[in-house]
Amino acid sequence: MNPFKMLEGRTVIITGAGTGIGEGIALAMGAAGANVVLVVRRREAGEAVLAKIVAEGGRGAVAMADAASMTQMAAAVDLAVKTFGGLDIAVHNANNPASAMPVALDAVTDADWEAQAGVAHGGAFILAKLAHPHLKRSAHGCYVLLASAFGLHGAAMNPIYSALKGADRGFVKSLAREWGPDGICVHGVAPAAATPPTEVFFNQHPQIRDQFLANFPLGRMGRPREDIGAAVVALCSDRYAYITGQTVRMDGGLFTA
Amino acid sequence: MTAADAPQSATTVLAGRSAMVAVSGLDFGAVLAGGLEAAGARVALIGDDDAAGFASRAAVDRAFEAAVARVGIPDLVVHAAAARALRQPAKLAAMDEVEFQRADRALRATLYCLQAAHRQMAGRGGAIVVVGPAMSLVGARDFVPLVTASEGQRSLVKSAARQWGHLGISVNWLAAANERYAGELEGMAPEGPELGPPPCALGRRPGWAADIAPVVAFLGSAAGRSVTGASINLDGGDWMTP
């Protein structure tokens, strides 16, 4: 077995795969030999990521879907199964862009809440429910939920995001216990990665960037593919098949409690 | 030494203070309220059944305003929310979206209660305590929505503590033993009821009036105001986490 092809022949579906951490995981999964089904809302974003995967000798497909829609996600999972003969790994990464914006808790409206919860919270459930029968049939079933350090320490910046990401930890812990007998590992991942929105923000506010990066023992934010994607590949490989129910921090040592 | 620094009797740490117990869908509100009264507080119990007021921000606000009329602006607000249906075991793969969204409704009930408490306390400070089940810390098979909601409530508490600390508002999360939180969770273990609960260090599960209410009262007292953002586990020593 090629040690660099840890996911050879397996099929993964990733929500929010068109940019940032989702793209990084998709590229790393493709390079590790997986068939990668990219769930995106803009086809051109998905096609661009797929082109990179194919250019490196990988395989994949693009599924247009809103991660918060049961109907659209059912079609995406169906595409994965029909195209590649099954589904081994499901990664829920999609988030509403508002999750990166500061919010005062006392001013949060129902609309604010729904915009983030529908994708983060509802999407986690929808993908899990749809993927379960296929992951159960796989000999390597993994469900990965992109959580956040915000859900660990309860960041002040965006209480909605913090609450939903804290909720993710409960989801992962409980689902791992529920699906363990089915041979499915359930992982939470709490990354701190430089993504296009954070780069834009930091370019506009270089002083904040310097202060923020000073909190990282490794002195930098993670790279979506090389740091986060590669670690998720390892987590879903046979090498870590005895880990489940954990929220794994991939944050350069930012949060160590 | 100021009056605020003076030692207080453990039984009257809330003397002269008002408290609200805002509990949705759970049965321990009255006994907890009684424990806080025993600590000297004027207490208003704001409760509802599964389908009533906590489902909307406006209804929560009305309930808080009515409680203020009874006991005054609260120095302490205790809150918990988990509908009965959320506490029934069920497999996630067999749920529909409506069933899973019960977790979101519980989270929103907590959001509304935190906001209502903030509106009352913003000018003078106070303490907020949110209560969850101990199973929140380790997860539980067949209770994905309940633990999802509870861990979300716990994280929301931390964010509130960070945003409102400068206003003199402390916000903490407290875990009660599963069966104290809700009777139907008695004997629940993370891997299911057939294995039974883990060994309990104290040999008993702390009760509301004698054990938990005094801790809540401490958090609502002057002596407890430096505690914020904490997760306090009162399960008798089951899990000892973190």
Image: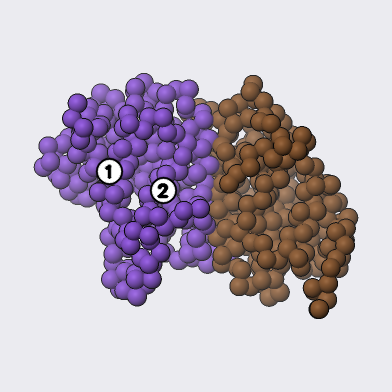
Q: Which chain is brown?
A: B
Are dots 2 and 1 on a single chain?
A: yes
Q: Colour of chain A?
A: purple
Q: Residue at x 59, y 31 (%)?
A: B190
Instruction: Give the Cα distance between marks 2 and 1.
Output: 13 Å
Front residue of this view, candidates A96 and A100: A100
Residue B218 visible in the shown view: yes
Q: Please state the horizontal and vertical placement of residue A103, each as a whole percent of the image.
A: 49, 65
- Give the answer, above or below, for where B160 lies relative to A119: below
**Quadrant of the image containing the N terminus of chain B:** bottom right
Badge 2, how many Cα within 10 Å: few under 14, some, many 20+?
many
Q: Nearer the viewer, residue A68 or B7?
A: B7
Q: Is A92 displayed left or right of B102 in the figure?
A: left
Which label belongs to residue A230?
1
Residue at point 33%, 62% (across, down): A219
Task: Give the percent coordinates (x, y) of residue A13.
Answer: 30, 36
Q: Chain of mark 1?
A: A
